[in-house]
Structure formats: structure tokens, C-alpha cells
Amino acid sequence: MSVDHHVTLNGTTRSRASRIATYLSTMFPPQVMGTFAACHFLAVWFALQALAGLAPVRLTWESLRGMATVALFLLLMRLYDELKDADTDIRLGRAGDPWYRDRPLVTGAVRIEDVKVLRWLVTAALVAINVRTGFAWASIGFWVVLAVTWLSFNWFFWPPMSERLLVAFATHNPISLLLDGYIVGLFADTFGADRLDASTFLLLVGLWLPIAAWETSRKIRAPEDETSYRTYSRELGWKIAPFLPAACVAGSASLLVLVSRIAGLGVVFPIVVAATGAMVVWRCVLYRIAPTRRHAKLKPWAILFATVANAGLAAAAASAGVGW
């Protein structure tokens, strides 16, 4: 039996497919991430239609392709991060870092070769569902996102970037903004590029900032929990770090309230997203007041805001009905 396809864990021989399933269930739960990808796509897709005065909003075959593409790109970015950070993650996990010691690559439940195979399978699937003949705005967006994602996997050919947290954030996190540009391309191909205006930019930034808030919030720790892992609370200090996710959430809430007003989406969504944003900002302030282990858990609050922003906007834009 080839060691490339099987590994023994606790006396049990497991196939590569089983190990990949373990990886996905741990690092990229399909039911969770698939739902988020669909909500995020629909938030952009429906909001663009609402801003263009199209009612009821419509689903199309292209929108289904778009949902799959968003989900697969999120998985590809996760796999790229896994591969380029593997040595660091394993070192941190073996040193006892609580964020890494139970990861499947650290425990041996998954091998690096499994992640590489999954990376190529996802890349092939992305190309297969997005290859089109002739000009299409979505095709341009797809190839741009794929190229920039690959560049990020190679640290944009500047490896020292991995040691500079803010530089890595500035170059990597906006890839999600480019992915939303792909959705805009699908919209332009389906409904016409002439229906887009400056409000599109407000929408995209408003839905990108929750992702930036999640990224910054997950790398904040209480002072006593800091390790060699690079966090914003370690790099910038605990007094400054919480204002990063707070600023992202406040900016997102402000922009999405403005977008909902331009699109005429009523008052419920603006109230809900503003109230949720205020609650998350308060949690960040609590950490600044008292940087305890409990207050350092900002990631769940950032996830809450991202969920409300995406699902809430999609629901508000679809409140007049959904057609096919």
C-alpha cells in the first residue's frame, strides 16, 4: 500500500479521500463556508440589481455559477494559506500554541500532499466552470482573481512580506474585493454594464470591510496569551489593535446604510446592521479597556457582523420578490 495515498492514525489506515474530508470538515466546513459564500454572492448580486432599479431581483444560471466560483475561490485561498504557512503552523502547533496544536496538519490527520492534491482539484474545477469563448466581463474578473491569488501564494515574489503583518494584510485581504469584482462582471454580462454607477464601489467596499474585520479580529490576543505567532496585538500593541476591526465594522455599517438608502431598501436592514455594528465596536472597546482573555475573543463578533451584513442585505434586496 502506497504511503502517498494512505496514512496510519491511531492504528487505522485512512485513504486520501478520507483525509481530505477530515481537512475540509476541520478547516473549511462545507455547510458553513458554502452558506457564507452563497450569502455573500447574493448580497452583491441582489444589491446590484436593487441599485439598478431592477425588481423583483432575479436568479439566473450564471448566478449559480457565480456562487460556486465564490465558494471555490474561498477554499483555494484557504489551501494556499495552508501550503505557504505549513512550516510555521506546524512549528507553532508543536510548541503548544492553542490555535494550532489541533490542526490536522499538526496532528498528522492530514498530509501536505493531500492539501496539494485538493488545491489542484479546486483549481481545475474553477477553470472548468469559468472557461468561456468570446468577450465577457466575468471572464476578465475570473482570470484577474486567479492570477492575483496565485501571486499571493508566492508572497508576490517578496518572501520578507511574510514577516510584515500589515504589508501582508494590505496585499492579501483586498483579494476578496477583487472577487466581488468578478460578481460585478457577471452582473454586467447579464444585465448590462450601463446599469453600474458609483454606488457599486460603495457596495463592494461595504461588503469587503467585514472580511477585513474578521481578518484583524482573529489575530488579537490577550497579553498573557501571546506567543511567537504574529498578531496585531503583538505587533501594534493591545492598545491600538482593537481599533482595526472596530474601524472596519464602523466603516462597513456606514457604507451599507448609505447603499440601502440609495437602493430604497427600507429601514429594517439599516437599523439592524447599524445596531450590530455598534455592538461589535463596543466589544472592541471593552478589550481596549480591559485586555483579558475573554475580551480578546473578537472573532465571533466579527463573524456575527459579517453574517448580518451579508444575509441581511441579500434579504432586504430580495424583499420585493425573487424571479428566475
Image: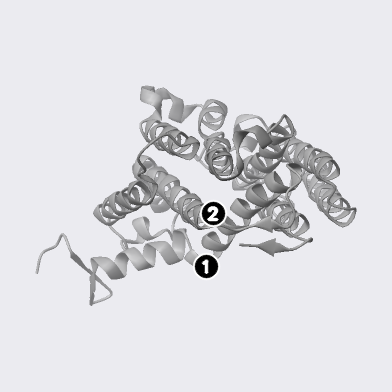
Three-letter amino acid code of the residue under disc 2:
Ser
What amino acid is at disc 1?
A: Gln
Q: In which quarter of the image is residue 236?
A: top right
Q: Which residue is drawn at 31% across and 61% down?
A: 110
**In the displayed structure image, the side of residue 300 where residue 115 appears, left or right:** left
Q: Where is residue 266 in the image (x, y as percent from the top left)?
A: 88, 53
Label 2 sits on residue:
63
Front residue of 100 and 175: 175
Q: Using the image, tell me which numbered label, if any, was put on residue 39.
A: none
Specify the quadrant that holds the N terminus: bottom left
Q: In which quarter of the image is residue 245?
A: top right
Residue 83, given in percent of the width and then of the height, sits at: 34, 44
Q: What percent of the width, then of the height, locates residue 306? A: 68, 51
- The answer for how far apart the CA atoms under marks 2 and 1 are is 19 Å
As drawn, which residue projects farthest toward the left? Answer: 1
Q: Which residue is drawn at 53% across and 41% down?
A: 189
**Residue lying at 16% horizontally and 59% vertically, measured from the top left:** 4
Q: Colour mode? A: one colour
Instruction: Kindly identify which residue carries mark 1.
Output: 31
